[in-house]
Image (cartoon, rainbow, N blue to C red):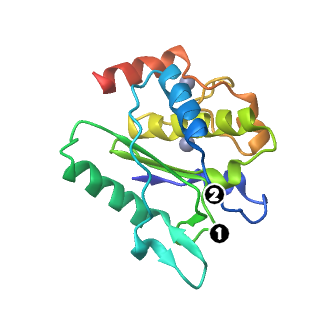
């Protein structure tokens, strides 16, 4: 099952500008994901699969990107691993204008489009990306949305919501994560 609430959540933010993540930002994001309870390993950047591009929309379709990521995990024999894909491209799902994040509920791959998380404040941008990443990874590990206002699994309806919640799982969600990772 795929979740795409990011689209509804971030609607009205205007057009996304491409954003090239720096190595420093990637490392800061990885550190945040680690603080959230995971053990991330950075992979080298690579181009998006050409079949994902919709030239008429000048956007990439998220499901193609996720299929590509799943293939990467299989090719590398990383069968027990999950992948968080960060893309600077503008992505969409059929039927939606654009999407900010997506996850296979109980699956392998999470996807976050960082272009719409941009902020003039670099640490805010990193923190948003970490929260979106942890949120989508939470779905991958089987978590649904949480009502704890500080929990990263709270459904944020705007970037302001996202800025208010904390970049970690509440104790209840952490129990589920712990079980899924083991
Ligand atoms: Zn969600
Ligand atoms: Zn929670």
Residue in the foreground of this view, choosing between 38 and 166:
38
Residue at image coords 75%, 45%: 158
Q: Residue at x 66, y 61 (%)?
A: 18
Looking at the rendered structure, the secondary structure element under dot 2 is: helix
Using the rendered view, name the quadrant where residue 22 is placed.
Answer: top right
* Image position of 149 with respect to 162: above or below: above
Residue 51, percent from left and from top: 40, 76
Answer above or below: position of 102 versus 152. Answer: below
SS state under label 1: loop
From the viewer's side, name the closer residue of 171 and 22. Answer: 22
| Position of the C terminus by quadrant | top left
Q: Quadrant of residue 124?
A: top right
Relative side of 53 to 114, left or right: left
Pointer 2 local density, CA inside 10 Å: few below 14, some 14–19, many at least 20: many
- Determine whether label 2 and label 1 are within 8 Å by CB: yes
On the image, numbered disc 2 is attached to which residue? 7
Q: Is residue 4 left or right of residue 76?
A: right
Residue indicated by mark 1: 97
Name which quarter of the figure residue 57 lies in: bottom right
Q: State the image coordinates of residue 39 (x, y, percent, origin top left).
A: 39, 25
Taking the image as four quarters, which one is ligand 2 found in?
A: top right
């Amino acid at each position: 099952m795929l979740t795409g609430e990011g689209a509804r959540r971030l609607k009205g933010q205007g057009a996304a500008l491409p954003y090239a993540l720096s190595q420093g930002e990637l490392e800061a994001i990885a550190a945040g994901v680690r603080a959230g309870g995971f053990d991330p390993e950075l992979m080298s950047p690579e181009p998006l699969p050409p079949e994902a591009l919709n030239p008429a929309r000048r956007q990439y379709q998220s499901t193609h990107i996720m299929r590509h990521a799943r293939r990467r995990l299989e090719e590398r024999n990383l069968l027990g691993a999950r992948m968080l894909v960060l893309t600077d491209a503008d992505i969409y799902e059929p039927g939606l204008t654009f999407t900010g994040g997506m996850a296979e509920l109980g699956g392998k791959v999470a996807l976050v489009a960082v272009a719409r998380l941009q902020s003039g404040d670099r640490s805010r941008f990193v923190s948003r990306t970490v929260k979106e990443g942890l949120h989508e990874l939470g779905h991958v590990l089987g978590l649904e949305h949480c009502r704890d206002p500080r929990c990263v699994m709270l459904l944020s309806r705007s970037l302001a919501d996202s800025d208010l919640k904390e970049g970690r799982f509440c104790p209840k969600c952490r129990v589920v994560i712990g079980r899924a990772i083991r």
